[in-house]
Amino acid sequence: MMVKVSSPGQIFLFGEHAVVYGQPALLASIDVRIDVEALLLDGSRFEVTSEGVGRMEGKVERINGDWKIRDKTGDVEDLQFVTRASEIVFNYLNRGEGISLSIESDLPSGSGLGSSSAVTTATAAAVSTVLDGELDEEEIIQLAFDAEVDIQGAASRAGVSVATLGGFLKVQDKDFESLEKLSKLDILIGYTGKYANTGELVKHVGNLKESRPNIYGPMVRAIGKTTEIGIEALNEDNLREVGVLMNVNQNLLEGLGVSSPELHDLIEAARDSGAIGAKITGAGGGGCMIALGSGNMNEISNAIEESGGIPIKTEIGVEGLMY
């Protein structure tokens, strides 16, 4: 039996990092996707082949009541989200089988576009489906979230929720709300080409918040406030206010130390070329930024390219998991 599952990438319109600490975030799925194909194998062999990432092999075994992938060889660290999501599904369904996973991605790894959430979600959905597990969306979100926490040490449900459900999503703790009435936005993504480690950046912000809670705690809460006011502005089609709030959100993220010179250059170039607002999307430290335009996307795109970035034009608010 073989199944194929596709999951979208995502952008944070507001709220990255703060969402880890219970603050609201607003995300949108993007039409840049990851496909995971799962094929049952005879025996216990487990293998993953990911275009542009690498390949690993292992053996599915039950040890002290838990299903594990043992004797892993190859690009193990680069594919750890895939293997951990598979193990979690094996244990949730109480069934481990030999499986071959083939992954194709249009999402650059470490780009801030939710590649880890997308591949973790698509893996959980593909493995559970090929094992005849009829999981609902909430179960897939929970299993993918558990895998991200195990790998990163801290995470929010925001990424895996959007990778599963698609659309525009307000996420806070375990709650999520689909926002279907948002105006159509002219959003352009600018990719620095620089890899960013989400787990390390999440830990960095956590360390800041723990070391100086009276300073960084209010900053995190202020990011959450930009989400709330930003949603109100979007519902009112007040794009000027949305842009102002994106810039405020960016200033706060810079205060948390998650920007980079490359991101700063692309953000400033976008603003100088007429973007209403521009900010990091995702963990920062590299990866991508987003710019909100108003009929001037070509000018913004050219400015990003001239500043050394890679402009990515994509539809937002697209469908989530596709089987």
Image (cartoon, helix red, strand yellow):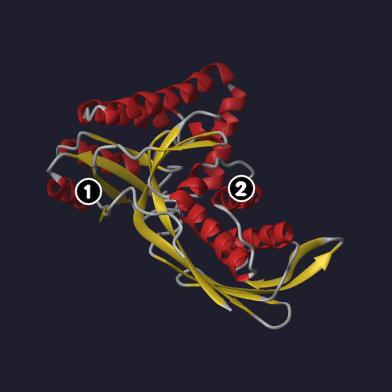
Seen from the viewer's position, the closer of residues 192 and 243 is 243
In-image side of 322 versus 72 (left or right): left
Q: For the residue marked with disc 2, what is the amino acid?
A: Gln
- Please determine whether, in this image, residue 140 is positioned above or below residue 263: below
Residue occupying the point 50% across, 46% down: 161
In-image side of 206 versus 232 (left or right): right
Residue occupying the point 12% across, 43% down: 295
Query: Quick one: which residue is furthest to the top in this view?
Result: 214
Residue 310 percent coordinates (x, y): 27, 55
Circle 2: element type: helix
Which residue position holds label 2? 142
Choose top left, top right, bottom left or bottom right for residue 26: top left
Choose top left, top right, bottom left or bottom right for residue 237: top left
| Label whose residue precedes the other's in the sequence (2 or 1) | 2
Residue occupying the point 56% across, 61% down: 125
Which residue position holds label 1? 304
Residue 243 percent coordinates (x, y): 25, 31
CA neighbours of label 1 inside 10 A, class few (<14), some (14 to 19), many (20+):
many
